[in-house]
Amino acid sequence: MSRPPDAFAHPPFEAERLAALDRYGILDTPAETAFDDAVALAAQLCGAPTALVSLLASDRQWFKARLGFAPGETGLDHSICVHALAERALLVIPDLAADPRTRANPLVTKEPGIRFYAGAPLITPEGVAIGTLCVLDTVPRPSGLSDAQGAGLAALARTVMTQLELRRGIAARKSEAAALADSELRLRLAVEATGAGIFDDDLVAGTLAWDRRTRALFGVGPDEPVSYAGTFLARLHPEDRARTDAAVQAALDPAGPGLFDCTYRTIAADGTVIAWVAARGTLVVEGNGGQRRARRFVGTVRDVTAERAAQAAVAATEERYRLVTRATNDAIWDWDLVADHVLWNEALQAAYGWAPEAVEPTGRWWLDRIHPEDRARVETDIRRVIDGDGQDWHHEYRFRRADGAFADVLDRGSMARGADGRPLRMIGAMLDLTERNRVAAQLRAVVEGANVGIVQIDPRTMVALEVNAKLCAIWGAEEADIVGHSVAKWTPEADAAERDRLHRRLAAGEIVRETLEKRYRRKDGRLIWGRVNLVSQVRGEAIQATAMIEDITAEKAAEARQAALIELGDGLRDAASPLEIRGIVARVLGRTLGLRDAGYAAVDAADLKGTGGAAREGAEGGAEGGAEGGAEGGANRRAAPAPLPATLARLRRGETLAVADLSADPGLAPDAGGYRAAGIRALIAVPLMRRGACAGLVYAHAAEPRAWDAGEIDFVREVTGRVSVALARIQAEEQQRFLNRELSHRLKNTLTMAQAIASQTLRNVSDIAVAKEALVARLVALGKAHDILLSGEGEGAALEAVIAGALAIHDDGEPGRIHLSGPALEVGPKAALSLALMIHELATNAAKYGAFSVPGGRVGVDWTVAHGRWPEDSQDAEPIVTMTWVESGGPPVAAPTRKGFGSRLIERGFSGAVGGETQMNYAREGVTCRIRAPLKGLLEKE
């Protein structure tokens, strides 16, 4: 059966094709007029009875449209279209029975007996071939399609693809429309649930739309027209109108943020207030050639009348509380130490909930309401002051409220003593610190949990006053290393001048609010980059400065790597040799990663077979050989690198190596000595794979252990990819130059042979017409031999292909007419051309006088290879090729009475070209031609 070509069966190709078919969603869909019209037009254009739109799935070809062909699908083993997909261009096969790709196809050998095929591939915009538009006929068409028919068929194929794209686009739009409708429904339900209204101002059309809720808030009926000036501004309270209009105009500025957030009052037609309304809106803009144009202004409105009333009530309560606390901010107490009697002011009830009737006026009542964990400590502390000679006392502790909760308080008291120093009374005030401590705790939690480093600084001395854990992590230091010390020490000396200018501004009392990027030197000596938000502000009579520092070292490194890739691309684009590429890679890679040993190296095939070899050295650049050279070009490598079998084995498998510490990696233990001798402690190595084999690698070596981050590894991978492209470009350019030289050489040889054929054919000619016919036939045979040579990937052609090509015009499809038999042999171009001409002459004679001149005549060509002496008197044996031409079933044979150029070409042309001998036998039952030649003569390239 017909087998799909290898290119078609390659898994990546198939995966792309199947994915493309899946995106179109076309398989097993009903017939559609547009595709049926396409096959009808194709059939009419090409004058064919059958036309198909064929799509190739994983295990079948399915016909979206078909004319003159009953099955709706066939297996891939019946498919002719697979060959068109492999070609990716218009494929015309004049006679399917004669073409080796299709002559065994069941559609050719059985019903419906297809003999002609022309197909144009269906190629997606992404360049993936998914099927064909093809025409079929049951009779051969030696001339194939006309140019106009071929162009028309290709154009129709593009039209079919356009229809597929339109079909996919329509389906996508339907899906998007359904999703949009669902989203709009969800949005409307959500908005209605919140009680909000929606407004939509089309700034292009000049129309304003309000929903039902918005109209209700402005006192407008459902059918009344609305406008900005006539309705919106007119229904705003006069005191709110100007500022609201200004806020709207600011939001409508395309150059601004495009946000509207305003609260105002709406009024009825008689001027009474309807509601307090909170409105928010967003400007929708579009870019047009760099210009921003406002298109719509949309947003929501919400009734906040109740909220405003609640806020007013809260404000009044807060004002009253402020007046009370102004008179008695603290719970004041007066403790008569002689009588053990305590008096409290009203603040004890106001602040802590204790009603006067619930308070026992003794010191014990107060002590009993201190938190059990604090009580002994507080009592000891206050007794120390009372019983001693101290005057003032203060303590922070937890005091139980009337509701059972504990408040954080700061209690202060002053002693009143008698003339003899005896304690008489203590008067004090208890301040509630609960809220302050809560806010302070929240602030501490925010500071400690912040993802940026935070440090408070005395701007006069630049001494750090407070620091969070994140900054300690950024600078790699303990808190004690920072607090109490000048922050200047964390700036590298190279940046000292810029640092000192900023410090002088802060010390002078300048209020600073700015963002800057600067370098710091961590405690371990490593330089990092930080983005600093620096704020200084007045707190009472003092100035405080706070710096929020974000580590942007990775961001800076990514920017540097991106710039390096641009530089690398510019250099590789103009590089003319692998050696120049190595210098560019070593320079860019070494500088970007801060290494002396980095670059690209080619790898010998033998190096990757576990023999202990290493990457090519010298001008090739070292791979694993040591620490010298690196960023300076990678060419001055040591001459005798240590063997690294484990490394090379993993590279051979296509693995990327990123090792932070080579001495601790058990997988590379066999190579430890080599790396140690080279002074390499950490590495990245990315193999450059060509046809499944490692052809080189890009490497980065560090003299100390180094934890490579993902960005660095990806960077080396990216460099490897670009090196691969550059090397492929250089190789392609060199191959092109080689092909040009080869083409010139072959053209000269062809012209020489054509000249010889013409000279021999026309020598002593008596009949110009016969000579012309013979000359044309011989030149055609020469051309076919060249076609066979050029169809392969090497510099020769298959022996069987050369013979079959020369006999193709005599193959009338009769079974057994031509028989070819022999082992597979590849012959050089000189032998191929001479053999094609000789077979052509033999076949021409057979068509005129021998087996091809009558039905039932047979021609067999057999060849064998066996060891023998050549020439006969040689002492050494070598492979000898024996080829025999045998005719049978033709008319009786008579030996020719004269020998022309054709006979001489048969007897001496091929044997002379390959150094062999030819024997002709004109037996009555059929001509026999036997050729013996050394195999090396047939294989010779030139």
Image: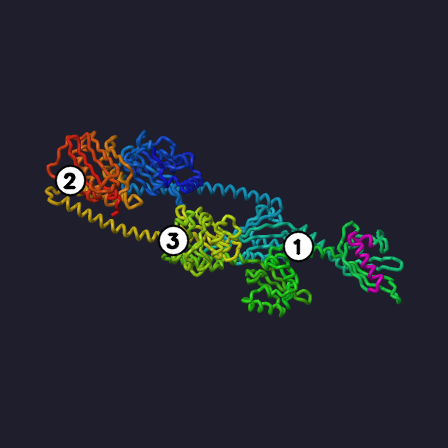
Could you tell me the amino acid type at mark 1? Answer: Ala
In the rendered image, which quarter contains the N terminus? Answer: top left
Q: Nearer the viewer, residue 636 or 184?
A: 636
N-terminal label among 3 and 2:
3
Picture coordinates of residue 238, whole percent (x, y): 63, 57
Give the residues in magenta. 366-390
Which is the main secondary structure of the residues drawn in magenta? Answer: helix
Q: Which residue is disc 2 drawn over?
A: 903
**Callout 2: SS:** helix
Could you tell me the amino acid type at mark 2? Answer: Ser
Picture coordinates of residue 406, whole percent (x, y): 76, 52
Q: Which residue is disc 1 drawn over?
A: 445
N-terminal label among 1 and 3:
1
Picture coordinates of residue 300, whole percent (x, y): 59, 50
Question: Is any atom of residue 537 visible in this view?
Answer: no
Q: Nearer the viewer, residue 616 or 677?
A: 677
Taking the spot 67% from the left edge, 56% from the top edge, the residue there is 444
**Callout 3: SS:** helix
Left or right placement of residue 768 versus residue 57 in this view: left
**Callout 1: SS:** helix
Q: What colouring does the structure picture have?
A: rainbow
N-terminal label among 2 and 1:
1
Q: CA distance from mark 2 to mark 1?
A: 105 Å
Left or right placement of residue 236 versus residue 128 in this view: right
Q: Give the foreground label among 2 and 1.
A: 2
Task: Using the image, determine if residue 22 lies above or below residue 749.
Answer: above
Q: Which residue is disc 3 drawn over?
A: 727
Taking the spot 57% from the left edge, 56% from the top edge, the residue there is 248
Could you tell me the amino acid type at mark 3? Answer: Leu
Q: Nearer the viewer, residue 338 or 27?
A: 338
Q: CA distance from mark 3 to mark 2?
A: 52 Å
